[in-house]
Amino acid sequence: MARTAAWRRPTARSVRNSRGVAARRALAGQLFSAAGLVGRPVKNSGGQDVGRLIDFVVRWDHGVYPQLTGIIVRVGSRRAFVHDMEIAEIARTHVALNATKFDLRDFARREGEWLVLKDLLDHQLLDVDGARVVRAADLYVARVGRSYALVGVDTSFVSFLRRVLPASAKTMPTPEKVVDWSSIQSFGLPGEPLRLRQPNRGLQRLRPAELADLVEDLARPERQQLISLLNPEEAADVLEEMEPEELGEVLRDVPVERAAQLITHMEPDEAADALRDLPEDDRDSILAVLPSAQAEDLTQLLEYDEGVAGGIMTSRLVKLSMDETVQQARDKAIAQRENDEVHGLVVVDSHGRLVDDVPLIDLMAAAPDKLIRDIIGPPTPGTVFPDADLEEVVEQLIANRGSSLLVVDESGRPLGRIQADDIVDALVESRSSRRWPWQAPRLGS
C-alpha cells in the first residue's frame, strides 16, 4: 500500500517530545493554581454560590506535603473558614462543597497553620535540592490520597505574568516549571523562629560554599533566619565563603554576642579579614566581648595590611619541642583539630625559634615512642617575613614547592602559616594589574 505524501515515519525525538507533552498535560490536569483560584466561586452541593475563595489553609508541622485543613471564603464582608472535610472537589474554575448548609465560622489562624497565598506567594523560599533561592510566582494544590495538599511551587516569570492576565488564563498551570514541594524550605511565619522540617534535612547536606550562595541571595531578614539555623561551627564555615560586603552585613545585623561567637569559630585570617572590613565601632564592640587571648591574637593580625604575608596568615599553630614524642605530637594535633584544620606541626627550639615543619603524614608513619628530633630533617621549611608582599609570597611558595609557608619574625620565631588557597584568595581579591614573575611582559611595556 502506497504511503500518502503527508505520512512520515516518527523519529525517536518526536516520540519523546509527544510523550513529554502528554505527561505535562496529564500533570496539568491534576494541579490547581492557588493564585488562579483566588476570587473563584465556592459552590454548595446544589451548585449555588456560597462565596468567593480568598486563600487555602495548610498545616506544615508534619509530613512532606502541607495538608489542606480548609479554605477561607469571602461571604459578604466576612472571612469565613470552611473545613477540608466539607470540600468535595477543587476544580480549575471553582471549589465544590459537599452540602447545602454550612456553619461558616470566622477564620482564626491556629498553631502550625499557613495561608498559602498570604504567607508564601511572592516570598523567598529555599529549593534545597537545587541549592538555590527561589521566589514563589504561583503555588499548586493537588489531591494526595483522600485529601488535598500543597505539592509544588512555580518559580517562572511566565507564571507571574499569568496572574495579571485575564481570568481565563489564570488557572492554566505550567507543570514543567514547578518545583516539588518536598525540596522546599520556607523561612517561617513573620515573627516566628525558623524551624527545619524533620522529613527534609536537605539543607544540612549542602556544602558551605552552596549555603554561602544561598545566604547572599536572600533578603536581610531571611538571611538572618538561615544563619540562625546553623550551629556556630557551620555558620562560621559559611561566612568564610561569603563575599566581604555580604559578610559584613551579616555581622552588623546580628547581636554583638552572636557576631563574636561566629568570629570565634572562624579561621584567624578569615576572622581578621571580616573585622578589618567592619566600621571601627563595630569592630571594637566585637573584640571587647571575645575571649582575651583571641582578641589579642586578632588585634595583632589586624595590625598587618591586607596585602602582606601577616595579613593573610592564620596564627593557629601547633608547636612542638624536639624532646616530645610522636604520640604527644599526635595528641596535640587531635586537640587542635577540634578548633581548626591542622596542616602541619611546627618544631621550635628552647628559644621558640623555628627548627622544622612536620607534615601530618610523617607523624602517622613514625613510631609513637620516637622523639620529634629523630624524625625531622631536610628540606628546610619555606618562610617569609610578615611584611612580605604577595609577589614575594608567591615566589617563595613556588621555589619551596610546598603547599604552605611559615611566617616568622626577625628572630626566626614562627608567627603563622599561609596556605596555598589563602594566596589564591588574596590574589583574586587584589584584582590588580601587577605582573607576576611567570607572566611575560606585555607588548609596548
Image (cartoon, rainbow, N blue to C red):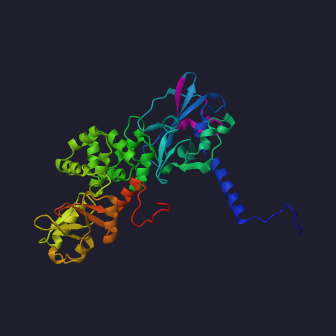
Q: Residue furthest front?
A: 444
Q: Which residues are magenta?
A: 78-100
Which residue appears at 30% of the width and 71% of the height?
A: 400
Q: Is residue 132 left or right of residue 168?
A: left
Q: Is residue 106 left or right of residue 279?
A: right
Examine the rendered structure and indicate whether residue 430 appears above or below residue 290.
below
Split into 4 quadrants, where in the image is the N terminus?
Answer: bottom right
Query: Is residue 52 visible in this depiction of the protein?
Result: yes
Measuring from the top left, give residue 418's x and y in whole percent.
Answer: 29, 61
Q: Residue at x 61, y 45 (%)?
A: 31
Camera sees residue 199: no
Q: Position of residue 34 (x, y in %)?
A: 58, 39
Q: Is residue 373 left or right of residue 158?
A: left
Q: Is residue 291 magenta?
A: no
Total of numbered circles in the picture? 0
State the image quarter where residue 389 is shown: bottom left
Q: Nearer the viewer, residue 44 or 194?
A: 194
Task: Write the residue at 89% across / 68% down.
Answer: 2
Queried whether the magenta region covers residue 93, the answer comes back as yes
Q: Is residue 269 above or below residue 414?
A: above
Q: Residue furthest left?
A: 350
Q: Pinpoint residue 362: horizontal percent, then vertical percent.
A: 24, 75
